[in-house]
Image (tube, coloured by chain):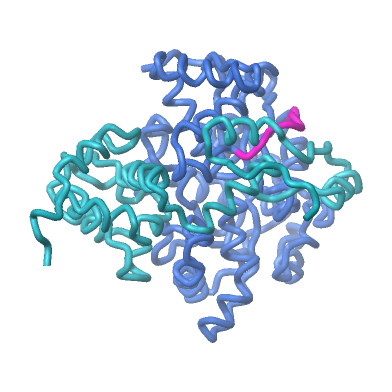
Chain colours: A cyan, B blue
Amino acid sequence: MIHSKDLDPHFKLLIAKEPGGENIKKCFSCGTCTAGCPVREITDRYNPRKIIRMALLGMKKEVLSSQFIWLCSSCYTCYERCPQDVRIPELMNAIKNIAVREGYIPSAMKIQIELLSAFGRLLEITEFENDKRKEFGLPLIQGRTEEVKKILKELGLQHEEERGPA
Amino acid sequence: MKKKEDQPKNNSFTLFLGCTVPVRALNYEIASRKVAEALDIRFNDIPDFSCCGYPVKSISHHAYLLMAARNLALAEAKGHPICTLCSSCCGSLTEANHELQEDKNLRKRINEDLYRWVGMRYEGEVRVQHLTRILHQEIGVRKISEKVQSDLSSLRVAPHYGCHYTKPSAIYEKLEDPENPKSLDELIRATGAQSLSYEDKLSCCGGGVLAIDEQVALGMAQRKLEHIQAKKADAIVLICPFCSVMYESNQKKIEKVFEKEYKLPVLYYPQLLGLALGIEPDELGLKMNRIRTTDLVKKALRRPA
């Protein structure tokens, strides 16, 4: 049961201010997004139409704390088909950006931030990779990119300080 | 309409590898470089490129733009357009580029942080293209088919466009209809091989949710393997290393979870093209393909009578 006293009418305005969330209020719930969604074909835990409806109603906590906002595969099928140009994958990112600021971040994403901060990439380039590159005559790649760590740290996304051995 | 950038001089590009290619898809890189050489495309390399920024898009749009802008600024200093092998890198860099080119105030804000933290600025002068798009648009199917040496006409392959190569179409200036793309089919036919049509041809590999929910991702990839198997294809042809993580690296796992057998060879388009151009299979990294391609190669190396 949804109680109106629990709803936050400003939630949609908050989303609309976020990059990618600008067009949320144009949604008229036609369901084209959900009908063509390849994730929805596999699991009913992801239903973009429902998520947008919940967000428009103001179900802030339910949406931000949910797992389902993280299930968009960013395939952009709905983006192309939406008659109202709601740009759903970008809208999902806008909602996820807010969720992260409110402290809801899946562990998988935390790990990705740590990897990017440590290596500047999701997968580490070790000596093994560069040796292989030498073997095939390919140009070598820099193993670490400190500048990514700097960016993530300055934005407060990476809090871990370098720790010495425990 | 934004300004029209100049055509790349002498087909020179800066190659953007991204995270996945150098670690999990070296065969794609090797074949791409070989094929480029054969078609007079020149690649420059920048060793300190980082991740394109795509993974942090869901965490912080600002962080995403900064990471993308840093890479774009590095390429801008070299003066060549970027060529990506990964469709997701292509989408991510193109989209950031689009935003930074269209919105001067945004570019100013991003440049303030970029300069303060890493001493760089991006002026919005770089063009980003996927290798497949370069092959299709700048080299062209006619020139490619003229260079074909081997008879691949008995090969039946299933093209997988993936998502970020064509979508969102707005950032690609609607070059190709994402609901009915043709470029990869045309490029496959240029090699002499048959390009198959199959159910759900345009659907996503599932890679985008792999880190969040493996079962969902595997389920998405399995559907496509099923549809391609129904067409008795010799291989699926990919243009993105992350699609390969789903269809090749995870194919055994999918077979186990869904109790099915596919053994579907996975080729990167430059590997197929390389075979057609008469490049030795060993020089196309085919030994690194996890699902055996021996039978395919045998068919491919049959010379015209």
| Residue B258 in the image, given as x and y percentages of width and height | 51, 82
Q: Is residue B261 left or right of residue B291?
A: left
Is any atom of residue B162 visible in this view?
Answer: yes
Residue appearing at x 62%, y 64% in the figure: B155
Q: Please give left or right for residue B70 compared with residue A43 in the image.
A: right
Position of B277 relative to A67 (above/below): above
Residue B104 position within the rendered picture, expressed as x and y whole percent measured from the top left: 41, 14
Secondary structure mostly seen in magenta is loop
Residue B10 lies in quadrant: top right
Residue at the image point whose x is 40% and y is 43% from the top: A101
Q: State the image quarter where residue B156 is shown.
A: bottom right
The stretch of residues the image draws in magenta is B43-51
Q: Residue at x 46, y 43 (%)?
A: B59
Per the image, is A73 magenta?
A: no
Question: Which of the pair B221/B11 is nearer the observer?
Answer: B221
Image quarter of the N terminus of chain B? top left
Q: Which residue is located at x 40 percent, y 56 percent?
A: A70
